[in-house]
Image (cartoon, grey):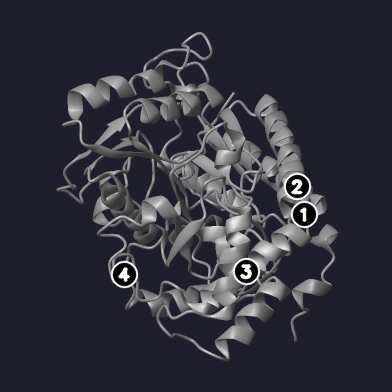
């Protein structure tokens, strides 16, 4: 039977699960892939076992005909939804002219850079295009070294910047475990994880002491040759940790006192994800270097280092090939990103994401009142998280086994979330509507009830 186009489906009747999950076709494809593909895929891909067919907006369909509500945006990428017609048209038009022509100039790239400069944070007017987020972060680190002639970095606990050596070395958390040795000259300072304060204090009576601690790190753990403090304005993979405004203000002040650059990694939070165009817009700060990615081209591979022309004019960054990348500067990437920025503006997606994100978060807080396994709900815009615990008193997280059971319960009801871990990320496309949001939240509510019954909460 011919499948109904996703655009013709009634959102009030979504999701539609017609087989077990994963279904027979998904299992067959994954069996074929498993003969040859590396085992280190994402947890959600491996646990779900799904093989995908197509997607539109906030709906995705697997090869068995099951239709899911996407509360993940892939890897927190598809801000304009899956296969937005205007983005698809722009990519198709450009790819018919060139698939690759290195980083030669093009009309489409010039138009994109003009619009990006109009949209970017104050002081960010010059850009270098890359592909993946980690490569982009490495580019930002090289720029910081070139501009300051210093070579050390301070990053934050639980930060995530990518999996190449420099980015990995600036990372907090567990992803770097087993991949040593790390690069020298990178040290870490506490983040503002108020639910689990690394200094065992309580906000606001703490006066944001975690931000002040950077003075100790600078004095005791560096040689004084710090090029930049690199951080996420809102930590994404680390658990959607939104710092108080005072934290960011203090970090910027520290940077200015010590002639250190403020390097804000917005690979995950760029392009309207947080209810502002950039996560830095939530704070009274002005980054010296910013990295953009993920949603900036609606899923087409693109990362961007942004800064001032003054910083980018420094040697060795400004020499021939000083900032190049094989696929950086692609006219196809530029076309996708230009279309993305236009769609975000024309369809008021930042404002829509902020309003709907507020509504979703309010419903998640009601779920917290209902379910004792929910320890914390946090986030802004379309970047949210639920932290599940064994006990609210001890804050002991649920186990990974329990988290995977909960993920499967949500999945089999027809909802994709962004992580299968004790901290569950909720990151829908900005084009999600309230009908699909309510349907997904109702199903998540059901799944949490099943989870709590299974593991005898309460």
Quarter of the image containing the N terminus? bottom right
Considering the numbered disc 1 on the image, is that residue within a helix, a strand or a loop?
loop
Mark 2 or mark 4: whose residue is earlier in sequence: 4
Q: Nearer the viewer, mark 2 or mark 4?
A: 2
From the top left corner, tell me how far across and down residue 435 is, in percent: 82, 52
Q: Do the residues bearing badges 2 and 1 touch, measured as CB atoms within 8 Å?
A: yes
Viewer-nearest residue: 419 or 252: 252
Q: CA distance from mark 1 to mark 4?
A: 40 Å
The image shows a total of numbered marks equal to 4
Q: In the figure, 266 relative to 49: above or below?
A: above
Which residue is the site of mark 4? 38
Image position of 320 (left or right of 390): left
Q: CA distance from mark 3 to mark 4?
A: 34 Å
Which residue is the site of mark 1? 348
Viewer-nearest residue: 200 or 364: 200
From the top left corner, tell me how far across and down residue 127 is, in percent: 46, 60
Neighbour tally class for label 2: few under 14, some 14-19, many 20 plus, Cα within 10 Å: some
Residue found 49% across the figure and 73% down from its top:
27
Residue 396 visible, this angle: no
Which residue is the site of mark 3? 338
Quarter of the image containing the C terminus? top right
Q: In the figure, 442 relative to 379: above or below?
A: below
Q: Do the residues bearing badges 1 and 4 touch, measured as CB atoms within 8 Å?
A: no
Residue found 39% across the figure and 14% down from its top:
200
Q: Nearer the viewer, mark 3 or mark 4?
A: 3
Which residue is the site of mark 2? 351
Mark 2 or mark 3: whose residue is earlier in sequence: 3
Considering every residue shown, the one lying at the far top of the view is 205
Considering every residue shown, the one lying at the far bottom of the view is 96
């Amino acid at each position: 039977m011919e499948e109904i186009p996703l655009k013709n489906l009634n959102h009030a009747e979504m999701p539609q699960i017609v087989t077990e999950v994963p279904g027979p076709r998904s299992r067959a494809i994954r069996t074929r892939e498993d003969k040859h593909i590396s085992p280190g895929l994402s947890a959600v891909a491996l646990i779900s076992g799904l093989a995908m067919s197509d997607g539109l907006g906030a709906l995705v369909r697997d090869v068995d005909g099951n239709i899911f509500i996407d509360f993940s945006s892939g890897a927190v990428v598809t801000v304009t939804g899956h296969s937005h017609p205007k983005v698809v048209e722009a990519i198709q038009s450009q790819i018919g002219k060139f698939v690759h022509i290195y980083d030669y100039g093009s009309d489409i790239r010039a138009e994109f850079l003009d619009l990006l400069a109009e949209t970017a944070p104050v002081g960010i007017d010059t850009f270098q295009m890359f592909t993946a987020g980690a490569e982009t972060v490495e580019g930002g680190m090289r720029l910081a070294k070139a501009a300051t002639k210093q070579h050390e970095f301070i990053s934050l606990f639980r930060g995530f910047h990518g999996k190449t050596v420099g980015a990995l070395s600036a990372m907090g958390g567990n992803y770097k475990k087993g991949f040593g040795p790390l690069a020298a000259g990178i040290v870490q300072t506490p983040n503002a994880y108020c639910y689990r304060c690394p200094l065992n204090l309580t906000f606001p009576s703490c006066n944001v002491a975690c931000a002040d601690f950077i003075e100790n790190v600078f004095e005791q753990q560096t040689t004084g040759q710090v090029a930049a403090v690199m951080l996420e304005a809102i930590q994404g993979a680390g658990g959607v940790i939104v710092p108080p405004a005072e934290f960011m203000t203090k970090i910027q002040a520290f940077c200015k006192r010590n002639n250190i650059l403020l390097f804000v990694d917005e690979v995950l939070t760029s392009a309207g994800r947080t209810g502002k165009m950039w996560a830095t817009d939530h704070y009274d700060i002005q980054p010296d270097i910013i990295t953009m990615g993920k949603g900036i081209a609606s899923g087409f591979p693109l990362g961007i280092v942004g800064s001032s022309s003054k910083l980018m004019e420094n040697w060795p960054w400004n020499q021939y090939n000083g900032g190049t990348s094989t696929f950086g500067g692609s006219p196809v990437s530029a076309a996708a990103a230009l279309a993305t920025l236009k769609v975000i503006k024309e369809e008021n997606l930042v404002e829509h994401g902020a309003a709907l994100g507020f509504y979703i978060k309010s419903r998640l807080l009601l779920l917290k009142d209902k379910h004792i396994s929910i320890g914390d709900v946090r986030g802004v815009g379309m970047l949210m998280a639920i932290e599940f615990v064994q006990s609210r008193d001890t804050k002991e997280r649920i186990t990974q086994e329990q988290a995977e059971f909960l993920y499967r319960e949500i999945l089999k009801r027809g909802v994709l979330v962004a992580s299968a871990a004790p901290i569950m990320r909720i990151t829908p496309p900005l084009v999600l509507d309230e009908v699909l949001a309510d349907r997904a939240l109702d199903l998540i509510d059901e799944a949490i009830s099943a989870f709590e019954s299974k593991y005898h909460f309460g």
